[in-house]
Image (spheres, helix red, strand yellow):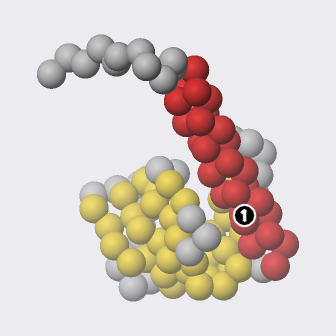
Amino acid sequence: MWNLSLTGWRFSGNLPLRIGEVCSLTVSLSTQETFYVAAGIVRWMRGEEYGFETLVMDDESREDMEQYVCQRVEDQWIAVHARRTARPRNQEVDRDF
């Protein structure tokens, strides 16, 4: 999987999917999270990459996914904030242009 959001996914694999095809999807992440999409549709494909829109997801999976996405966003915000505050304000930044 390359990325995910509350409304869709981008993943790759040698799968027999076609644009417009409706199917179910079970996704297991490296964090041991598993999400079940009861119905989704393939919106695009490029070689072995697919764009998949979530149409129907059970409440438990949706809640778990919302928590997962919110945690990833929070983690990224904290990391960005930490990098910004670690650099002294008046210190010039070396730039190789």
Instruction: State the image coordinates of residue 27 (x, y, percent, origin top left).
Output: 66, 59
Tell me the amino acid under the disc marked 1. Met
Quadrant of the rendering where the C terminus is positioned = top left
Instruction: State the image coordinates of residue 94 (x, y, percent, origin top left).
Output: 30, 14
User: Relative to residue 3, is residue 5 depicted above or below?
Assistant: below
In this orientation, does residue 93 appear?
A: yes
Q: Nearer the viewer, residue 5 or 35?
A: 5
* Label 1 Cα crowd, 10 Å radius (few <14 / some 14-19 / many 20+): many
User: Relative to residue 93, is residue 4 depicted above or below?
Assistant: below
User: Relative to residue 69, is residue 96 depicted above or below?
Assistant: above
| Residue with the mark numbered 1 | 65
Q: Nearer the viewer, residue 59 or 90?
A: 90
In this orientation, does residue 61 appear?
A: no
Q: Residue furthest right?
A: 60
Q: Going 55% across and 36% down the picture, which residue do you hit?
A: 80
Instruction: State the image coordinates of residue 90 (x, y, percent, origin top left).
Output: 43, 19
Instruction: State the image coordinates of residue 52 (x, y, percent, origin top left).
Output: 47, 72
Q: Nearer the viewer, residue 80 or 70?
A: 80
Q: Quadrant of residue 5?
A: bottom right
Q: Going 58% across and 27% down the picture, which residue do you hit?
A: 85
Q: Quadrant of residue 32?
A: top right
User: Relative to residue 72, is residue 15 depicted above or below?
Assistant: below
Q: Residue furthest front?
A: 90
Horizontal side of 45 relative to 42 (left or right) equals left
Q: Residue furthest left?
A: 97
